[in-house]
């Protein structure tokens, strides 16, 4: 069944503005794959560091040979899904909620999840003067990025697990859920408009720099402390027409994650340099360092956690029960992983057959 209108939106960072990143230069004598160019999309956000670093260091372009990368950046999931639907991008890094929404709204026709990219990087941070324990959240005002977004769903589910009541649409109840753009959440916290926030990095660490305290890391409430925060998706048409290009991008993504994990300090600096190019401002060390440490970069899409996130949205009344069978096509990724001598990953029964 289709998702309810205007719900399950962004991955949780910024607005809908789009900004073109520089076009990567392919080697002039390198052999082109089946497409002369691949258009990729991602967020100027640390949880999308696989793309940030992969482009910045030329690791993605290296695998594509003479096929050029054209990169575009987005600040919210809906605009990236719209770009994928319109054929403006071919492959994107994006959060689980917009992936689910894009898949269900199209009746399973427009995208496939083809890889994981990152886990974690979401925290509940609060004013330590007014909130000292988790039980103190009752009666407080807590920001989430957007109605129905990945963090909003997670917080509503956590509230329900506590036995508290909140109307999902209005955000009113035992806790006031205040939907606030991450760009202005630090100002809202500074002014006292909210008592805290359930937000992704680097917003969480920006609030800590303003005096907030981390009360809960979302990783701590998931099995094995892992949950998907960033997927890699592809247009189904592009996957069918250019499987060699998709495989090359996935090989670049896998090798970028390997480089990030082998060289964390260099990778962190590279991601910050990319953010500075895109936004005009690098993250200060007091924000960058704790934010980076809370994110795990991995190729496994953690499919069972995406299924759980969809179930949480259903129980909150933000999504009609979706049929997610076929949302994953991990065959190209598993081919790459096998060639790298790595174990295959699982689609939790939600893959194409």
Image: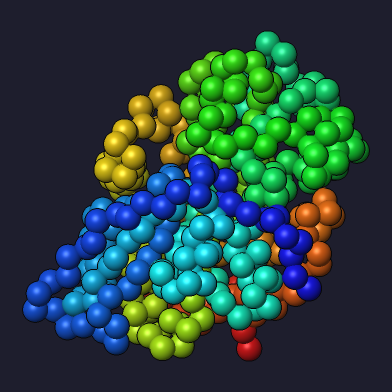
Horizontal placement of 88 versus 346: left or right? left
The residue lying at 36 percent from left, 32 percent from top is: 283
Seen as rendered, the residue at the extreme top is 129
The residue lying at 48 percent from left, 20 percent from top is: 209
Horizontal placement of 137 versus 33: left or right? right
* Residue 334 visible in the displayed image: no
Quick one: quadrant of the C terminus? bottom right
Q: How many marks?
A: 0
Q: Is residue 57 above or below residue 181?
A: below
Q: Which corner quadrant of the image does residue 241 belong to?
A: bottom left
* x then y, percent, for residue 323: 75, 74
* x then y, percent, for residue 82: 52, 65
* x then y, percent, for residue 216: 66, 32
The residue lying at 86 percent from left, 32 percent from top is: 173
* Residue 281 visible in the displayed image: yes
Q: Which corner quadrant of the image does residue 199 belong to?
A: top right
The residue lying at 52 percent from left, 72 percent from top is: 85
Q: Is residue 1 above or below residue 16?
A: below
Front-lying residue, 297 or 74: 74
Which of the colour schemes (rainbow, by chain, secondary structure, one colour) is used? rainbow
Q: Which corner quadrant of the image does residue 101 belong to?
A: bottom right
Q: Is residue 110 above or below residue 268?
A: below
* x then y, percent, for residue 23: 23, 61
Quick one: quadrant of the N terminus? bottom right
């Amino acid at each position: 069944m289709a998702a309810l209108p205007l719900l399950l939106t962004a991955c949780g960072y910024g607005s809908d503005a789009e900004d073109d990143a520089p076009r990567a230069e392919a080697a002039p004598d390198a052999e082109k794959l089946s497409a002369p160019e691949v258009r990729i999309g991602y967020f100027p956000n640390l949880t999308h560091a696989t793309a940030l670093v992969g482009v910045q260091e030329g690791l993605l372009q290296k695998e594509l040979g003479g096929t050029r990368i054209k990169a575009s950046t987005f600040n919210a999931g809906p605009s990236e899904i719209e770009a994928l639907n319109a054929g403006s991008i071919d492959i994107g890094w994006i959060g689980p909620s917009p992936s689910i929404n894009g898949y269900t709204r199209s009746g399973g026709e427009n995208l496939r999840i083809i890889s994981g990219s990152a886990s974690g990087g979401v925290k509940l941070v609060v004013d330590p003067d007014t909130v000292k324990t988790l039980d103190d959240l009752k009666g407080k005002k807590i920001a989430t990025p957007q109605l129905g977004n990945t963090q909003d769903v997670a917080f509503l589910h956590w509230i329900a697990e506590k036995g508290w009541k909140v109307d999902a649409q209005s955000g009113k109840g035992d806790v006031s859920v205040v939907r606030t753009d991450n760009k202005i959440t630090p100002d809202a916290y500074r002014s006292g408009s909210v008592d805290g926030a359930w937000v992704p990095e680097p917003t969480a660490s920006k609030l800590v720099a303003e005096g907030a305290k981390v009360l809960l890391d979302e990783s701590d409430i998931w099995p094995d402390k892992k949950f998907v925060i960033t997927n890699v998706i592809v247009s189904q048409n592009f996957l069918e027409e250019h499987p060699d290009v998709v495989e090359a991008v996935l090989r670049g993504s896998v090798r970028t994650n390997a480089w990030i994990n082998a060289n964390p300090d260099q990778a962190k600096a590279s991601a910050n340099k990319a953010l500075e190019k895109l936004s005009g401002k690098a993250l200060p060390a007091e924000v960058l360092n704790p934010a980076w440490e809370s994110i795990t970069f991995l190729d496994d899409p953690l499919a069972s956690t995406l299924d759980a996130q969809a179930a949480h949205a259903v129980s909150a009344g933000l999504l009609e029960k979706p049929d997610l069978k076929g949302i994953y096509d991990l065959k190209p990724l598993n081919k790459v992983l096998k060639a790298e001598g790595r174990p295959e990953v699982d689609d939790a029964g939600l893959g194409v057959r």
